[in-house]
Each structure stands twice: as C-alpha cells, then as structure tokens.
C-alpha cells in the first residue's frame, strides 16, 4: 500500500520508494490566447481570453492556475455614434 504509515514505523517494503514516492509534477499551462471582441458593440461589455493545460498535475503536484480571464470593455463601433 502506498501510505506513509510505513515510513513512520520504519516498516516499508523494498520497492516503496520506487513505487509510491514518485516525483510530484506541477501543472504547466500555455500562453494566454488573444482577447475576444467586446461583447457589446456600444457601451459596457466584456472581453475574455483563455489558455490550455500543457502538462496536467500528477502525484500531488501544484494545481493548475486559472485558465480563463474576463475583463470589462467599452464597445466603440462606428454605429454607436448614430444610435440613439
């Protein structure tokens, strides 16, 4: 069994280190993609962008950071000037 009790009692099997104590691998992510267009052509809206996991976490490694971001924007399409 891969629990830590044997380490505390000094009673681990010979293959415990090789089988159970694998190196932790933290999450790795790619670069941020481009921001999307503003969700509103006129006035307040939002933009979003995302990134992908390139290496998932394993063996208790660091969790992945946020994969999506959102921010506010102000739509300034040319039709906004003529809209009432």
Image (cartoon, grey):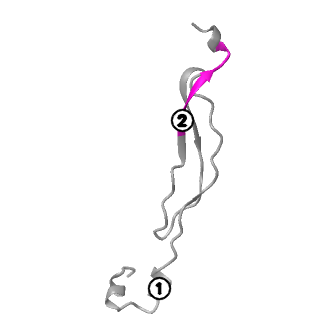
Residue 16 location in percent, x, y?
Answer: 44, 86
The quadrant in which the C terminus is found is top right
Q: In the figure, is residue 13 to the left or right of 22?
A: left
Work out how far the residue at label 1 is from the one at label 2, CA to CA, in angstroms. 46 Å
What residue sits 35% from the left and 91% below the top? 10
Q: Main secondary structure of the magenta part?
A: strand
Write down the residue under mark 2.
Answer: 71
Is disc 1 placed on a helix, strand or loop? helix
The correct choice, above or below, for 56 with respect to 13 in the image is: above
- Mark 1 or mark 2, which is nearer to you? 2
What's the magenta region?
70-79
The correct choice, above or below, for 60 with respect to 8 in the image is: above
Write down the residue under mark 1.
Answer: 17
Magenta span has 72? yes
Sort mark 1 into few (<14), some (14-19) or many (20+) by Cα contacts within 10 Å.
few
What residue sits 63% from the left and 37% below the top? 35
Magenta span has 62? no
Residue 30 location in percent, x, y?
Answer: 63, 54
Residue 43 location in percent, x, y?
Answer: 55, 20
Q: Residue 79: which quarter of the image? A: top right
What residue sits 54% from the left and 61% below the top? 27
Is disc 2 placed on a helix, strand or loop? strand
Closer to the N terminus: mark 1 or mark 2? 1
Sort mark 2 into few (<14), some (14-19) or many (20+) by Cα contacts within 10 Å.
few
Q: Residue 47: which quarter of the image? A: top right
């Amino acid at each position: 069994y891969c629990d830590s009790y044997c380490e505390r009692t000094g009673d681990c099997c010979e293959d415990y280190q090789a089988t159970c104590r694998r190196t932790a691998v933290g999450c790795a992510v790619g670069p941020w993609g481009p921001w999307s267009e503003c969700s509103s052509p006129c006035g307040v809206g939002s933009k979003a962008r995302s990134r992908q996991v390139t290496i998932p976490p394993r063996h208790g490694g660091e969790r992945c950071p946020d994969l999506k971001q959102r921010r506010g924007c102000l739509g300034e399409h040319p039709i906004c000037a003529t809209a009432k």
